[in-house]
Amino acid sequence: MDVNNPKASLSRRVISYSVSAVLGLGNSYTALALPIGANMQYGDIQIDAAEQSMLIEQLSQFGVINWDSFSIDADQRVDISQLNLDAAVLNRVTGANPSELLGQLSANGRVYVINPNGVLVGEGANINTAEFIASALDVADSDFLDGGDLTFAGQSDAAVINLGQITADNGDVILIAQVVENAGELNAENGTVGLAAGGNAYELAINQSGIVRATGVTQREGRILLTSQGSDIDVSGTLEARSASGDGGQINVGGGRAGQNPDLANAANVNVSDSALIDVSAKAEKADAGTAIVWSDRQTDFAGNIYGQGGSDSGDGAFVEISGREILNYTGNADLRSTSGETGTLWLDPAQAVISTASNDTANGVFNNAVIEQNLATANVVVEASNYSTASFSPGSILVSAPVSWSSNSRLTLKSAGAISIENNLSGANGELVLSAGVGDPADQGGDISSTAGSEINVSTLQIQQNNDAQPFGVQLPPAVERKLGSITLAGSIKAGTLDILRQNAGWGSAININNTTNQIARFQTTADSLSASASFEGDILIDAGNSALAVAADLSDMGPGRAITFLADNNIQLLAGTQLSSGTNANVIIASRSGAFANQAGANAVLPGSNGRFLIYSDTPDNISKGGLSASPLYNHTYAADLPSSITESGNRFVYSLAPEVTLTADNVSRTQGAANPTLSYSVSGLVGGDSQADVFTGTPTLSTTAGNSSANGDYNIDIATGSVVLSDFGYGLNLQDGTLTVGPNKELLVTADNLSRVYGEANPAFTSSYSGFVGSDDDSLFDGFTINYSTTAQVNSPVGNYNIVPSGANSLSDYDINYRNGTLSISPRLLNIRVQDASIDYLDSQPDYSVTYSGLASFDSASDISGLVIDDAAYSGVGGFDIVARGASNSNYTIQYQHGTLEVNPRPVTLTVRDTSRRYGQDNPTFSLRASNTVPTINTAITTWIMCCRLLFLQ
């Protein structure tokens, strides 16, 4: 058996073994104590045996020993001392007895135990080496000594069984036989754990019920391999693998991904019981989980648990594939969550799939809906029925006959080789759903995707795509770029934030019909893959968003001939930037908002019907539409419900509105005086909407008439309006005709009123003006343009203060008005007069002078004599200084008089004092001396000390 590329032809029977049976032990067999009968084949090896122990000292890098027997009793031990971790010794048993390793075996290098009679590691046994390989199949010495890949082969049907504990500190733990069973514990902290069953034409099996741990270094990444070439594998224990960095490791049970790894043997059948645990979760805080593959060529039954969580801080969940080429029964549970990374994926890969309430159905690949729900709570789930087929077994379709509900944001993917039929609810409002149908027959058209009218899909995102993985047996499919998906008919209700159609390969071979009016689809988009350049749509496309507003971000520019595009919604429809809708030749583009508006953000080329086609865009009113460069005539008073596109006979591209406007032609109201001729009758147009012009809406003119003649009495007369030559266009307006009124009456009267004005006494009169009242209808002051009004008044420039009439006059009529005039008032107000007293000065005790004044503000024709009663009072002074001179009493009724005081400046009086002459006799006393004052006031006789204070002393003699 080549552990890297096994090629043996295998039988298909599964058998059970007891320990004695698989080891080939008879009733009289007695285990031998310690290895015996060593025959050195290669290397420098020394052996030192005691009663209960043995020391094997290997002094060369490689060694080969053929033994008569290689066993260790429960109370015995064998120690192998080697040069380094990579040193290897091959222990081959050439005798007839199996190897029973019941005690302890230790080595610091690699140890191989080859025994075609079988190998048993007993309960309580402990093997601790750098690497340990036990095999019932032989390997050539030359291959072993080359240090390369090893091919294990032979006719042995014996087993390798582990009931104890095997630990490889720096390498792999590999158990190889036709039957391999592990009920103990396998640990390879820096390597791979492999359980390989295979060889020639024997019944083969692996039974794993113990604990297997592999923690790998960077190169090995912690792998666990349980492979059985064409045989059966039973797992009921624990498999745990992770890398040295803390990432999850790799576990393969029964084969590689999709059974396509040539380096791993494929099992015929795999059974993982409900007590089994497969653990590839990350152990470091920031680490990704690993990969677990469970595969069989015939049938896989999986009831165990899978741990594949990402690191507690960051890291993605694991990828797990559980597959049976023909039959898969899955009732297990996978926890592949991630704290902040991507949730891992559980890939269930039978040949066909039915989701129902049944618990097990090997004939139909049934998945219980509760199991799917349980796994969606902790993992993304892929159910793929597309990869595998034989001459008698074709890959099947997928049927959903039972409801599936999940509250997580996990993604459910259904991948089939043929059709996908949804007959019950898929409810994951926070999650995603991917429907991927493939080529299910030799034709190049893919399988159909459908849902029944009573079903409901409720997800955040629904993506529909072609399954490129499908490959029917014996069919040479065209290249991927030439393949087309079948039809999409989703009659059930869809509630989705986004509906995504993937443009891929050659596109879609049939219609896409998503037409349930209770849908709630917020966004429709197409997403392109790397091969989308040739993708086209060979069927009609109808998307009904139901009672949701719809945003469209789609490239539907490659429609087949005669293929139409239809988008429907109860509410608003919006074309997002980049959208292009191009129907095929002779086909239309229909966009219908049943009660909402339309908005185009994709420009003038967003909607391009094919030749001989057109677009019809339904909306509510032109006020609520954003055309974004699209150009088309309107069509009013049409709804999608009442007026389907096939019933609209008006030609060309159209914006179709539910609004029902009426163009109203109204006879204008006019009037005339009795005896005058009727004025020209006219009409007005109203009711136009959306920027429509009169010429767009109708041609021709209505007929206007009245029964009023020149002799008709005063009163109102009807102005009749009739259709005349008016012809409405195909815009869909209604026509409303409104009569008018001709009023015959007496002449109208206008009142011209002179405006009230004012001025100051002595100024000239201002320019006179008038105001007008009594206009009828639209007449206004402009009637008086060029009309002359004369004004007169008795007020002159020297007229005294008071009120004077302003008398307007002119023609007595204007147009059909009689004119009456009304006087205004000119008010003359008093003039401001300022009287100022002139300043003066005196010496103290002089008489006051005659005072005078000046006048400011007298009218040009008035003088001071016109002002009477002016009195100027003497200044009341009491010594030297400035004193007010006050005027009062002036009067004139035409003036308002203000006074400005003058100032009397009283200066000190100049006085001259002279000492009088006197004489005396010699020897007599001097006489009394005296003064004489000049410029005094005679009437005042006071001491000098009294009056000198008010006088200025000039000199003293």
Image: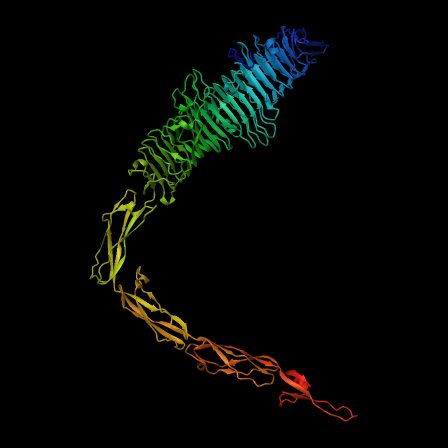
Q: Residue furthest bottom?
A: 921
x, y percent for residue 42: 65, 8
Q: Quadrant of residue 32?
A: top right
Q: Residue furthest front?
A: 922
x, y percent for residue 69: 65, 7
Q: Please determine whether, in this image, residue 691 is positioned above or below residue 235.
A: below
Q: Please determine whether, in this image, residue 736 is positioned above or below residue 432.
A: below
**Which of the pair 190/50 is nearer the observer?**
190
Q: Please determine whether, in this image, residue 840 is positioned above or below residue 589.
A: below
In the image, taking residue 869 as reference, residue 924 lies left or right, namely right
Q: Quadrant of residue 197?
A: top right
Instruction: Look at the image and tell me in which quarter the C terminus lies.
Output: bottom right
Q: Quadrant of residue 153?
A: top right
Q: Is residue 403 visible?
A: no
- Point 43% across, 75% down: residue: 830
x, y percent for residue 556: 39, 32
